[in-house]
Image: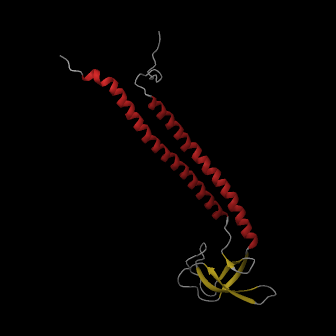
Amino acid sequence: MRTRSHRPRRRNNPLRRRSDVVETWVVAVVAVLVCVVAPLTGTAAGLFTYDRARTHAEEQRAERQPVRAVVAGRPASRPTVHGDRGHGYRAVVRWAEPGRPTRTAVAGVPAGTRAGDTVTVWFDGRGRTVAPPPNDVAVWQHTVGVGLAVTGGTAAIVLLARAVERRVALRHRLAEWERAWARTGPAWTRRRA
């Protein structure tokens, strides 16, 4: 006794058009691109970004010096336009290095700092106040942000290409239907006597 399969056989289906086959393959390719290639692209971009950002942070840590300073003046009442990671307010700070006279500078201080508070101020090799170097959290945030952006951008490009392909396929499908109706229609619409 033979059992019959209830699965439709697609190869011998007389209603199957060439556009249906193309659409099936396009959907499979788009699924692979969105689910596999886009995340791999984002991961590769994230790894590249992590190496660059970590190297950059290490270079900044090597060239910048932290100094513990006392806030000498009252901080500005409004934050500066170009605040650096939580140090958006400017104030006069004073510190003394061993064997040198007391120095003062205008530096970025955290919000809520008052005169007399001790803060950490960063200086570059030329003695200018600079932002603190990025820590590991900032490096990872940058890495994840770039990885997600590249993944989303890749997926968006693939889906946009799919939308364009779908419009073109719809035009071709409608043209196939018109040609098929042109062959079949006269036989159905003849007047019967």
- Placement of 136 over or under 118, stated as above or below: above
Answer with the quarter of the image where residue 86 lies: bottom right
- Placement of 131 over or under 192, stated as above or below: below
Q: Is residue 62 left or right of residue 118?
A: right
Q: Residue at the left extreme?
A: 193
Residue, x 48% and y 47% (percent of image)?
160
The front one of 72 and 8 is 8
Q: Is residue 13 left or right of residue 99?
A: left
Residue, x 69% and y 60% (percent of image)?
52
Residue, x 46% and y 29% (percent of image)?
18
- Placement of 19 over or under 97, stated as above or below: above
Answer with the quarter of the image where residue 6 lies: top left
Indicate the position of residue 49 as horizontal and vertical percent values: 66, 57
Indicate the position of residue 145 as horizontal and vertical percent values: 58, 58
- Placement of 82 over or under 172, stated as above or below: below
**Quarter occupied by the C terminus:** top left
Q: Is residue 99 left or right of residue 188?
A: right
